[in-house]
Image (cartoon, helix red, strand yellow):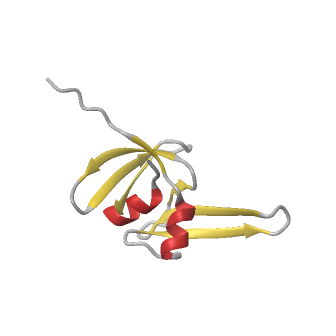
């Protein structure tokens, strides 16, 4: 019996923002710049629920992948979220 090993990937919300701007297929990016400290924040939010599903640089688990989408699970925060990126968005957001 083959063991099902799930892969983890670090997600770059900043890379998505630089390529697509704020609007993605299933999600949107909430970008904030804080002048007082010069920090940039890139947060991925679900379009339907406005829930924060992933912050820039968090590690997510690939739980399902097909020809058009990748379903990821983020348990880096206080609450575990599952979200979907289309394949092209996923490829832009991850590094090998």
Residue 32, picture quadrant: bottom right
Q: Check the image and report above or below for 5 versus 68.
A: above
Residue 45 horizontal/vertical position (percent): 50, 64
The residue lying furthest to the top in this view is 1
Residue 17 horizontal/vertical position (percent): 54, 70
The residue lying furthest to the right in this view is 36
Residue 85 horizontal/vertical position (percent): 37, 61
Q: Quadrant of the N terminus?
A: top left
Q: Check the image and report above or below for 20 versus 91.
A: below
Q: Nearer the viewer, residue 45 or 25?
A: 25
Left or right of 64? Residue 56 is right
Q: Nearer the viewer, residue 50 or 93?
A: 93
The residue lying furthest to the front in this view is 96
Q: Nearer the viewer, residue 43 or 46?
A: 43
Q: Residue at x 24, y 32 (%)?
A: 4
Q: Residue at x 21, y 59 (%)?
A: 67
| Total number of numbered discs in the rendering | 0
Residue 81 horizontal/vertical position (percent): 44, 50
Q: Residue at x 37, y 72 (%)?
A: 25
């Amino acid at each position: 019996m083959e063991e099902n090993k799930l892969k983890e990937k670090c997600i770059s919300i900043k890379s998505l923002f630089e390529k697509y701007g704020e609007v993605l297929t299933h999600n949107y990016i909430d970008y904030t710049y804080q002048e007082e400290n010069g920090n940039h924040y890139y947060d991925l939010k679900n379009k339907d629920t406005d829930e924060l599903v992933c912050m820039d640089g968090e590690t997510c688990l690939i739980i399902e992948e097909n020809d058009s989408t990748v379903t990821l699970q983020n348990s880096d925060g206080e609450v575990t979220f599952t979200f979907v990126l289309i394949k092209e968005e996923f490829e832009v957001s991850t590094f090998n």
